[in-house]
Amino acid sequence: MISRLRGRLLARRPPHLLVEVGGVGIEVEAPMSTFYALPEDAAEVVLHTHLAVREDTLTVYGFHSEAERALFRTLIRVSGVGPRLALAILSGMSAEQFARCVEAGDAAALTRLPGVGRKTAERLLVEMRDRLPEAAGTGGAVTGGGSGDAAAEAVEALVALGYRTAEAERLVRAAAEPGLGAEALIRRALQRAVR
């Protein structure tokens, strides 16, 4: 099991990161909360990871903190919640916000996340209520923007998280502000979507 990576951040293209570890480039899928906490490209990063082994693929999921990874692992044990939906949940709200939603029984807040319908939200509330202590949360801080067309990159990241293209474009347009990098734009768009 690969549970931690320490290496040089080569590239970031939400939801994927490329981390060089011992001369090997490892592609890692990560929630936006992890992107916000990362240093600039080519800096050393430490990611807490979860390795998913499927019939035909090995996928490494990376998280800024052990608490995020713990919540991810707890989420994917819920019936009907796979890794992609778990990443979307962690991208749309911090682990603390998720815990507050579960404690308050706030299904409406959960249904504002991409891919979470009413039934899934209710299932999350029921199944996560007993599991919250093992998945204590943590938040993430925003870091600087990226290069290239930030709006297009933001739309692509939102689509990868489960939003329809038209919805992703609308959210990015509403969040746009001169000088914002892709990561900051994605964060603002996700915050608007959850409101």
Image: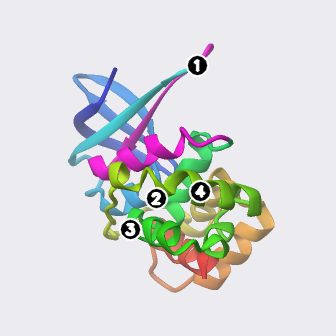
| Of the pair 77 and 16, the residue shown nearer to us | 77
| Amino acid type assigned to the residue bearing label 4 in the image | Val
Residue 96: image tag: 3
Q: Nearer the viewer, mark 3 or mark 1?
A: 3
| Amino acid type assigned to the residue bearing label 2 in the image | Met
Q: Nearer the viewer, mark 1 or mark 2?
A: 1
Q: How many marks?
A: 4
Residue 191 falls within the magenta-colored stretch: no
- Residue 39 found in image quarter: bottom left
Residue visible at 31% across and 69% down in the picture: 141
Which of the two discs, 4 and 2, labels the residue nearer the N terminus?
A: 2
The residue singled out by tag 1 in the image is 54
Measured as percent of width and height from the top left, residue 161 is found at 62, 54
Measure the alpha-carbon separation of dots 3 and 1: 30 Å
Quadrant including the C terminus: bottom right
Q: Residues within 10 Å of mark 3 (few under 14, many from 20)?
A: some
| Of the pair 27 and 92, the residue shown nearer to us | 92
